[in-house]
Amino acid sequence: MRSRAFRLRTRWLIDDERQRCWEFLTAPGQRWRDWWPRLQEIHVDRADDLVGSEARCVWRSPIGYRVRTDLKLVDVVAEKRVELSVRGDVTGGAVVEFAAGSSGGTLIDVALELTPAARWMRLTTPVLRPLFMFGHRVVMRGGERGMNAVLVGRRAVD
């Protein structure tokens, strides 16, 4: 029988330096919904040193279903790496790594290992796995485009 776990990897190329990307993503009062199109709801409880920070999110897929996640930062190496635990409709973990990209940009590598926890997802994964993976790609690409748009716009104003 095929595993129900999803091992997902996304690479973002952000057209700004790593320090600015890090500062943008970790800024107090970050308004994620302003630039991540498929993030429908987010409530953040931010810890002073980031470790222990939590975000409760609702993501809207391009085909209509919603996924609820509770993300908790469990390890942070500033400007290099964060590790998160994931609970909610899916459970597992994520590692996000930041590296210098070409032409002064930043590569953000997101590796997720998630298992469906919501009953409807567990039952439908054997059939809907390709749609879930498609939905994840669309959500993540929207985040990459949105972050690039905001940072390029800010740089033009600086």
Image (tube, rainbow, N blue to C red):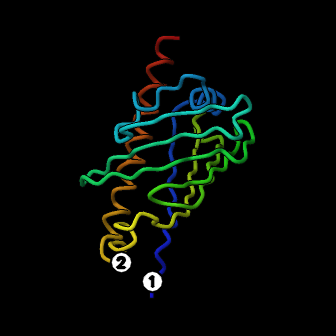
Residue 31 disc label: none
Residue 140 versus residue 15 in the image, above or below:
below
Q: Earlier in the sequence, mark 2 or mark 1?
A: 1
Q: SS for tag 1? A: loop
For the residues bearing labels 2 and 1, Cβ distance under 8 angstroms: yes
Residue designated by label 1:
2
Name the amino acid, label 2: Pro
Residue 145 versus residue 110 in the image, above or below:
above
Name the foreground residue: 156 vs 32.
32
Instruction: Specify the quadrant that holds the N terminus.
Output: bottom left
Which residue is at a point 30% across and 64% down the rendered structure image?
131
Q: SS for tag 2? A: helix
Residue 41 appears left or right of 90: left
Residue 115 appears left or right of 76: left
Q: Residues within 10 Å of mark 2 (few under 14, many from 20)?
A: few
Image location (x, y in percent) of residue 155 = 51, 18
Which residue is at a point 50% across and 67% down the rendered structure image?
115
Image location (x, y in percent) of residue 21 = 59, 31
Residue designated by label 2:
126
In the image as oriented, which residue stretches furthest toward the front?
119
